[in-house]
Image (spheres, grey):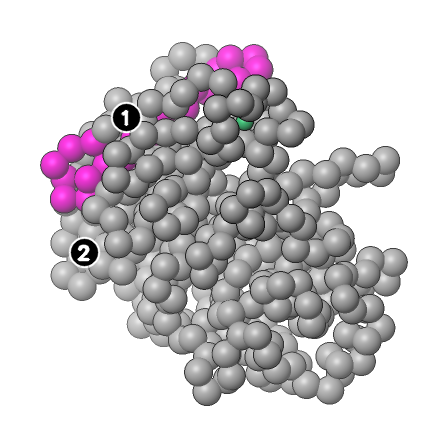
Amino acid sequence: MFDTSISYVGESIEQVSEERSQSIDVPEQGLSSDEAIITIEKGYQYGNMQKGLPSGDFADVGEKVVFLHRDGAGGRAYQIDKKTLEVLPFCNDATCLHDGGACKSYQIEANLEQYRGELYAAKLVIDETRPFYKIIKYDGVDFEPVLSEGVSGFFHANGALYVVSPDDALVRVNLDGTELQILIDEFDGHWCTVFGDYLYGSTWSEVFRVNLNSSDLKKEILATTPNGMVTDGEHLYYFDKDDKVIRLDMDGSNEVTVIEEGVPLVGFAFDEQNLYYRCLAGPGSYMEDGDCYSLYKMDKTTMESIKIAELPYCIMGIYTACDYDRIFVACQDRSVAPDEYEGYRYHYYAVSVDGTGYEELQLPNY
Ligand SMILES: [Zn+2]
């Protein structure tokens, strides 16, 4: 049950619980149900937004892509100029010493999201009892909290902010943090999104949808999988027990195996026209087994697949950006043992989607 000691900005839990027993409407600040978004929104962050905490490390914000580089000290945020591929510290402040605390580059912990032009992220807060996340929003100068209380996860979709509370309730609020509604008391979904009337998500055993306009908000199981699912609003893509990529229509029908070779979830992304992926060596293989260097592109219409790059290190993350002729790829050098503090060393690449080449991003030292 929702912990009643937690109160969100502008509204008490008691009020919300009463409202919930009446009806669940599309939030006022979002769209009316007639206009509810059925397919993916222009500028939406594709699968990156569905891969919430603790992934979701790239966000496409206008002319820039903001990303989080992780090392032993935690996360450091950078910004990439999409035209020049120049990489700068996120704070982009020549007077900043980038020594933590005041530097904005160190305030993001995870779950970067761009929604309707705004940058959101999760900030880690540690109090006397346990660490928790706060949702923060960048106003162009600084980060401001969106909700006063902690969350264990969040995502934006369909004109609203969806939050998983620390005690696992799924809550919907307006983008500005007002008008809180508890949707589901005990929610175990991850990598969720909402299109039209339906919430789509997965657990470590199933792919499901929930009709948010129904009175009982029950899960409808669409497939069983231990490996997760992402959706582009036209299809659901899930990873079966052998890591094959299976495509379903949004109601769970029309099952098609689109990639026979195993694909790790970290090595899969999409945009309007294409799927991007790397392969595993086979069922049960380790991430670094086999050809983890080749990056493939599959046209969603023709289902033809071509190799667009062979990178120097093992592909461990693929991120698409809007209206852009490159995708970003995070690779790990897994040929050498991880550093005790920094783990495996990351390299980042901007890969041309037409297969004409790639460029390594040069991260400034700070
Ligand atoms: Zn700084």
**Residue at x 40%, y 54% (from the top left corner):** 45
Q: Kindly indicate the quadrant of the structure image that contains residue 8.
A: bottom right
**Amino acid type of the residue tagged 2 in the rendering:** Asp
Secondary structure type for disc 2: strand
Residue 227 drawn at (x, y percent): 47, 49
Q: Which range of residues does the magenta coloring cover?
A: 338-358
Label number found at residue 105:
none
* Quarter residue 365 falls in: top left
Q: Residue furthest front?
A: 95
Graded by Cα atoms within 10 Å as few (under 14), some (14 to 19) or many (20 or more), the crowding at tag 1 reads some
Image side of residue 51 versus residue 254, left or right: right
Residue 278 seen in render: no
In the drawing, does residue 214 fall left or right of residue 83? right
Q: Nearer the viewer, mark 2 or mark 1?
A: 1
Check disc 2 and report the residue beneath it. 299
Q: Residue at x 46, y 87 (%)?
A: 34
Left or right of 364 on screen, residue 149: right
CB of mark 2 near ligand 1 (< 8 Å): no
- In the depicted structure, whether residue 86 falls above or below residue 36: above
| Residue at (53, 74) in percent of width and height | 30
Q: Nearer the viewer, residue 336 or 329?
A: 329
Q: Position of residue 276 (x, y in %)?
A: 27, 47
Counting other residues with Cα less than 10 Å from the Cα at mark 2, is it few (<14), some (14-19), or many (20 or more)?
some
Q: Which residue is mark 1?
A: 360
- Residue type highlighted by circle 1: Glu
Question: What residue do we see at 77% from left, 74% from top?
Answer: 16
Q: Secondary structure at mark 1?
A: strand
Residue in the foreground of this view, choosing between 209 and 347: 347
Pick whichever of labels 2 and 1 is earlier in the sequence: 2
